[in-house]
Amino acid sequence: MICSGQYTRKFEEAGLYYVWSTFVDEYEIKNYGGTVEVVTAAAKHGEVTVTVAGIEALPEVGGR
C-alpha cells in the first residue's frame, strides 16, 4: 500500500505550533510529529508598476 497526500495550513499569528500526522504506514505504526515556529515577517515596501500592451497604468491613491 502506497499512501500520498499533503496538508496545508496558514498560520495567522506568530507562535509555536505543535503538528502531527495520523498513521502513515499500512501497519498503523509510524506517524510524524514536531513543532513549527512562526515568526513575524518584516514589512516590505517597494515600487509597483503595471503595464498592459505597452501602456503603464497610473496610480490613483484611494482609487477602486
Image (cartoon, rainbow, N blue to C red):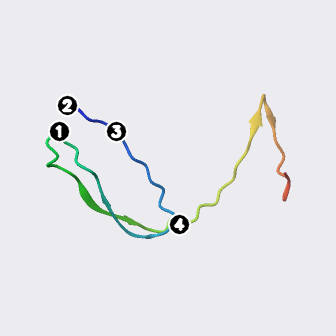
Residue 5 image label? 3
Q: Earlier in the sequence, mark 2 or mark 1?
A: 2
Q: Position of residue 34 (x, y in %)?
A: 26, 61
- The kind of secondary structure element at disc 4 is loop
Label 3 Cα crowd, 10 Å radius (few <14 / some 14-19 / many 20+): few
Q: Which residue is mark 2?
A: 1
Q: Quadrant of the N terminus?
A: top left
Residue 42 image label? 4
- The kind of secondary structure element at disc 2 is loop
Q: Is residue 9 above or below residue 43?
A: above
Front position in the image: 4 or 16: 4
Please tell me which residue is depicted at 82% across the width and 42% down the height of the picture: 57
Q: Earlier in the sequence, mark 3 or mark 4?
A: 3
Please tell me which residue is depicted at 58% across the width and 65% down the height of the picture: 43
Residue 26 image label? 1
Q: Name the front one of labels 1 and 4.
A: 1
Q: Is residue 10 above or below residue 58?
A: below
Q: Position of residue 60 (x, y in %)?
A: 85, 53
Q: Quadrant of residue 26?
A: top left
- The kind of secondary structure element at disc 1 is loop
Label 2 Cα crowd, 10 Å radius (few <14 / some 14-19 / many 20+): few
Q: Name the front one of labels 3 and 4.
A: 3
Circles 3 and 2, Cβ within 8 Å, touching? The answer is: no
Amino acid at the residue labelled 3: Gly
Q: Is residue 55 above or below residue 11?
A: above
Horizontal side, residue 48 vs residue 44: left or right: right
Q: Earlier in the sequence, mark 1 or mark 4?
A: 1
Circles 2 and 1, Cβ within 8 Å, touching? The answer is: yes
Amino acid at the residue labelled 4: Ala
Q: Name the front one of labels 3 and 2.
A: 2
Please tell me which residue is depicted at 49% across the width and 68% down the height of the picture: 13
